[in-house]
Amino acid sequence: MKQLYLAIALVLGATCINSIAQVEAPAPVMPASLLWFSPPNNPLLQGSWVHGAEQNTGPYILRVKLAASGRIPPHTHPDERNSTVLSGTLYVGFGETFEESKLVAIPAGGLYVVPANVPHYIWAKDGEVMYQEAGVGPTATVPAKR
């Protein structure tokens, strides 16, 4: 039995090493190559799929630019999202109604997590903000019910 386990381990190890060896170099995604889009009802918001896409199964990374004073009204996502603020200060609140008193300031370098299906809203109160969201798709953005 030990020989069987050893044989399986050797095969799996060789497969992993072979897979790693096939990757010759990293393939960076440079900011200049990003394709930006804006939703029709929010011109102060721009997004770009850095890795993956909304409808794809698997991990994704979405880069977001929110112009000064830009807001994203209460909404949910079907998956948990981890968001890192890259520049500026992003104000985030949880709930189905935009309430300034519930906003939390997330400065550049900060990360916040929004659990799946939790209504939240965002504001670039102090100036332009860039942040990056990561999760596992497929995903969507669903306006909160009022």
Image (cartoon, rainbow, N blue to C red):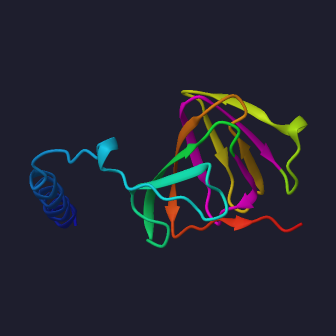
Q: Nearer the viewer, residue 132 or 1?
A: 132
Residue 128 appears left or right of 70: left
Rendered location of residue 79, percent (x, y): 61, 62
Residue 69 appears left or right of 140: right
Identified at 64% across, 39% down, the residue is 112
Q: Is residue 53 above or below residue 86?
A: below
Identified at 80% across, 64% down, the residue is 144
Q: Is residue 71 above or below residue 136?
A: above
Identified at 22% across, 67% down, the residue is 1
Name which quarter of the figure residue 109 lies in: top right
| The stretch drawn in magenta includes residue 117 | no
Q: Nearer the viewer, residue 35 or 40?
A: 40
| The stretch drawn in magenta includes residue 79 | yes
Rendered location of residue 124, percent (x, y): 68, 37
The stretch of residues the image draws in magenta is 71-94
- Main secondary structure along the magenta-highlighted residues: strand
Rendered location of residue 54, percent (x, y): 49, 67
Q: Quadrant of the C terminus?
A: bottom right
Numbered-mark total: 0
Q: Nearer the viewer, residue 125 or 78?
A: 125
Residue 114 appears left or right of 111: right
Name which quarter of the figure residue 131 lies in: top right
Name which quarter of the figure residue 76 lies in: bottom right
Rendered location of residue 142, percent (x, y): 70, 68
